[in-house]
Every structure is written in structure tokens, then in C-alpha cells.
Image (spheres, rainbow, N blue to C red):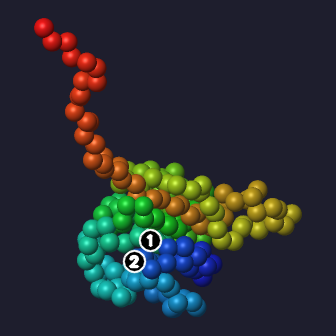
């Protein structure tokens, strides 16, 4: 599944060239086939927090509002809220988060339970994102293999909610500041003045 997600991740990062980005993966990944634009940090989960280009824990050692794109692949449920709050802190206004999560309604969840993975419903992820100030901006997308049926696989749209992974896209929105208000011109009398 991680390999199937890479083209979408590369496409997302290529849409925002020359901007700083952060990519958090569940395991160490080989370098992508294409060179990624801009400056970025690739991290993966480790026993002591995160490893990769940096070795760190939460809070991430990045300045506030310094990253324009964040890719989160399969966030652990235990620290999801804290990680999303940290992402909101380091994300620039107008920046975007791509959250790849295991689909809790997919039949593939039976395979994951044997490995100890817990999947949240997409609505739960959407609620967590909105709770930290990152509203979802695009429709929920489903990726990955489809559970085989006796009659074969139908159209992709009919089985979309049964796919293994769901993708949520959220954006940091901030209220625009109020610009300077122009001064009104002084009131001038435009008629003749009567004098006595």
C-alpha cells in the first residue's frame, strides 16, 4: 500500500514547488524515483519518536508556520491528536495536509487486526482535523486494492468505500487581517456663506 501511495504523494509535493514540506511515514522508505522539489524533511516512526533526516520527538524541531505541505501516512491512533496539533502549528496559512489512513470500513481491516493496527473511521479523522483547525477541503478519496468478490471487481466507484486506504486533504485557514482604513476627507462647505 505504501508503494501505491507514493505517486499521489509525489504529485501532491510537486504541486507546491519550492516550498518547504514534511513527510511522515510509518516505516523507512526508499528514496522516491523522482527528485522532490523545494526543501523538505522525511521522517518515519521509530521506537524513540521519529527518525530519518532528523531524530526527534513531539514537538517537532521546526519553527511555527514554516512548512507548506505535510504528508502523513498511517498515523498511529495513540498520538494522532498531538501530532495533528503539531502539524497545525508548523503549517503555513494556506498550507495543506494529506492524511493517508487505513479505511476502517474496508474488509482489509481483518488483515490489519492480526498485526495490531487500529483503523479509525474517516469521519473520526475528519473530526480530529477540524478540531485542531484544519478543515477538509476536498472530497474523501479511497485508494488501494479492492476486496475480491465472486463476480469479479465492478466499477471502481461502486467499491470505493471498501478500498484499503482513505485520503483526507485539509488546509490551514486563517482570518485575513483588516487592512488600513482610509481617512475621510475633512468636511468642506461647498455653498455660499450668508453673513449678516
39, 87: nearer the viewer? 39
Q: Name which residue lies at 27% across and 81% down.
A: 56
Tell me where residue 122 appears, x and y as whole percent. 53, 55
* Dots 1, 2 in contact, CB < 8 A: yes
Q: Residues within 10 Å of mark 1 (few under 14, many from 20)?
A: many
Q: Name which residue lies at 45% across and 59% down.
A: 171
Instruction: Judge left or right: residue 51 versus residue 138.
Output: left
Q: In the figure, residue 164 lies in which quadrant?
A: bottom right
Residue at mark 1 to residue at mark 2: CA–CA distance: 7 Å
Q: Name which residue lies at 52% across and 55% down.
A: 137
Q: Where 63 falls versus 54 (above or below)? A: above
For the N terminus, give its image quadrant: bottom right
Tell me where residue 149 appears, x and y as whole percent. 80, 64
181, 135: nearer the viewer? 181
Looking at the image, can residue 14 be seen? yes
In this figure, which residue is indicated by the disc labeled 1?
Answer: 69
Secondary element at tag 1: strand
Tell me where residue 77 appears, x and y as whole percent. 41, 64
Secondary element at tag 2: loop
Q: Which mark is residue 20?
A: 2
| The residue positioned farthest toward the left in the image shown | 196
Q: Name which residue lies at 28% across and 24% down.
A: 190
Q: Where 124 falls versus 189 (above or below)? A: below
For the C terminus, give its image quadrant: top left
Mark count: 2
Instruction: Judge left or right: residue 134 versus residue 106.
Output: left
Amino acid at each position: 500500500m505504501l508503494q501505491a501511495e507514493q505517486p499521489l504523494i509525489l504529485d501532491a509535493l510537486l504541486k507546491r514547488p519550492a516550498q518547504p514540506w514534511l513527510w511522515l511515514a510509518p516505516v523507512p522508505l526508499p528514496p522516491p524515483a523522482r527528485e522532490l522539489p523545494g526543501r523538505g524533511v522525511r521522517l518515519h516512526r521509530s521506537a524513540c519518536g521519529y527518525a530519518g533526516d532528523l531524530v526527534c520527538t513531539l514537538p517537532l524541531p521546526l519553527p511555527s508556520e514554516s512548512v507548506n505541505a505535510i504528508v502523513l501516512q498511517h498515523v498511529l491512533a495513540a498520538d494522532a491528536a498531538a501530532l495533528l496539533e503539531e502539524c497545525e502549528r508548523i503549517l503555513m496559512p494556506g498550507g495543506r495536509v494529506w492524511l493517508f489512513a487505513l479505511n476502517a470500513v474496508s474488509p482489509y481491516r481483518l488483515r490489519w487486526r492480526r498485526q495490531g493496527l487500529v483503523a479509525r473511521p474517516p469521519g473520526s479523522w475528519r473530526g480530529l482535523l477540524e478540531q485542531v483547525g484544519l478543515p477538509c477541503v476536498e472530497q474523501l478519496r479511497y485508494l488501494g486494492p479492492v476486496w475480491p468478490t465472486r463476480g469479479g471487481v465492478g466499477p471502481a466507484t461502486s467499491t470505493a468505500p471498501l478500498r484499503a486506504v482513505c485520503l483526507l486533504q485539509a488546509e490551514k485557514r486563517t482570518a485575513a487581517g483588516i487592512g488600513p482604513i482610509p481617512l475621510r476627507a475633512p468636511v468642506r462647505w461647498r455653498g455660499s456663506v450668508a453673513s449678516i
